[in-house]
Amino acid sequence: MRIVKALPLMLLSFIVYIVFTGSIRLYDIVTGIAVAVVIGLITANVVVSNPSKAYSINRLRWLIQYVFHYFLVSEVKAHLDVIRRALSPRMPINPGIVRVPYRVESDYAEALVACSITNTPGTVVVDLDKDRRIFYVHWIDVKTPEPEKARLEISELFERYAKKIFD
């Protein structure tokens, strides 16, 4: 059972290793496999509780779609917005901390949404209330202080993907 839980982690670790080394030489492939096996076996019981989710092709499809959308659309738009603000003579910002309720269920989905918000320029999750299911987000340009409208602006898209991938 442990190997069933470890295989997805091994594959993910191997892919990350190869991407970060930027090399597909035999030495890097062998080293990547060794590192991936060790990481997968050590962390499998802690990281994977339901192995059937890890083997779902549909979840993988949503993950790939999320990665492309996040890095090629959301990140680019947010970076351009922050650059525009930084280069503007008046520096049009309206910073503040807003409450953003969230509707994802699993800890992994919650972490994906929080990291997506934080990694997007102009927003950062500064606190989390798990009991009330609220992120406290510092927003470079507060468009609305109302929690539900802020959720639609900041995290709705991330939540949609997180639910399909993890919940």
Image (cartoon, helix red, strand yellow):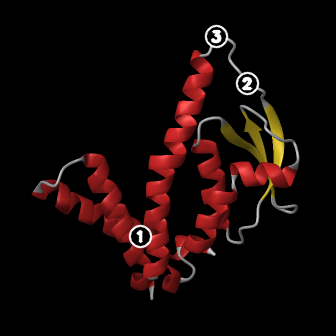
Q: Is residue 153 left or right of residue 47?
A: right
> Mark 3 is on which residue type?
Pro
Q: Name the residue furthest left.
A: 26
54, above or below 161, in the image: below
In the foreground, 39 or 61: 61
Q: Are marks 3 and 2 in contact (CB under 8 Å)?
A: no
11, above or below 52, in the image: above
> Mark 1 is on which residue type?
Leu
In the foreground, 118 or 31: 118
Q: Are marks 1 and 3 in contact (CB under 8 Å)?
A: no
Please name the residue shown 32% across and 61% down the image.
15
Q: Position of residue 43 (x, y in %)?
A: 48, 69
Identify the residue under disc 2: 93
Please name the residue shown 31% across and 55% down the image.
17
Earlier in the chain: of badge 1 and badge 3, it is 1
Q: Position of residue 32 (x, y in %)?
A: 25, 60
Q: CA distance from mark 2 to mark 1?
A: 42 Å
**Mark 3 crowd level (few <14, some 14–19, many ≥20, 10 Å Cα):** few
To which quarter of the image does residue 95 belong? top right
Identify the residue under disc 3: 89
Q: CA distance from mark 1 to mark 3?
A: 48 Å
Please name the residue shown 56% across and 83% down the image.
50
In the foreground, 132 or 49: 132
**Mark 1 crowd level (few <14, some 14–19, many ≥20, 10 Å Cα):** many
Identify the residue under disc 1: 9
Position of the N terminus by quadrant:
bottom left
Label 1: element kind:
helix
